[in-house]
Image (cartoon, rainbow, N blue to C red):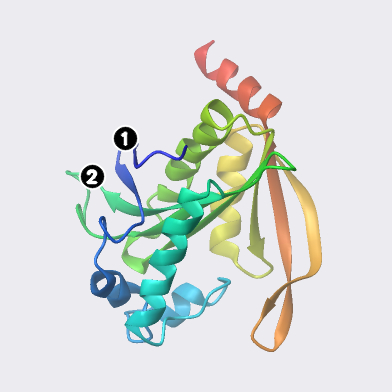
Amino acid sequence: MFPERIETDRLLLEAISHENVDVFELYRHVGHDAPDIDEITEYLSWNPHATPRETKEFIDSAEESRSEANGAEYLITPEEGENGAGEIAGTTGLHVDWEKRTGTLGLWLRKPFWGRGYSGERASALLKLAFDRLDLELVAVEHLVGNEKSRRAIEKYVEDHGGQHDGILRNWHPIGDEVRDSHRFTVSREQWEESRAGETT
């Protein structure tokens, strides 16, 4: 149901599995000693992995979710010609609530890959997957209050695809000892189709 590979102009998205990524290679980028990991995860819903076992369990979970058609996690790798081509730049996901016909996007990127427009590029690919292939009605994305880098990236691609800012979800994300507020944005199938029609005229 979820494709193994998705290619965009500059990126390769490859389904996370033990076949596609080595536990220790991924752990090098998500573990507690990874470069800039505290800054990267400051506004994320997960903490740096304490051991490679956590990374293995993450890959196990990604495989299970995809096999059960609940969603997919993808490695993000810049294509040839990009600075850092072939490296793991981060991961992205599309998680589906079939009863609500809604997909939710997730993303994190290593710091050397910030500011390149990769967030919007991968979002465009996952929106197409959600609406064209999975026949969903809505795609949502959130960012924690205070995460200005994510806010700017999300606002741009949501606007490009005709979507909207729905509002702030109060006390929405428990992280450690606190519960954080989150901004929610959505793009509907109708908004997405209208934005695509505008591209061809």
Q: Is residue 99 above or below residue 174?
A: above
Q: Do the residues bearing badges 1 and 2 touch, measured as CB atoms within 8 Å?
A: yes
In this rendered view, identify the residue nearer to me: 57 or 10: 57
Q: Position of residue 187 (x, y in %)?
A: 67, 38
197, 14: nearer the viewer: 14
Q: In the displayed image of the protein, which residue is found farthest to the top?
A: 201
The residue shown at (39%, 60%) is: 114
Which residue in the protein does label 2 denote?
79
Q: Is residue 13 above or below residue 26?
A: above
Report x, y in % for residue 173. 70, 71
Above or below, 52 against 111 in this view is: below
- Whole-number angstrom distance, CA of label 1 to CA of label 2: 8 Å
Q: Is residue 133 left or right of residue 140?
A: left
26 to the left or right of 61: left
Q: The residue under label 1 is which amino acid type?
A: Asp
Within the image, what quadrant is residue 189 found in? top right
Label 2 secondary element: loop
What residue is disc 1 on? 9
> The residue under label 2 is which amino acid type?
Glu
Q: Relative to residue 124, is residue 23 depicted above or below?
A: below
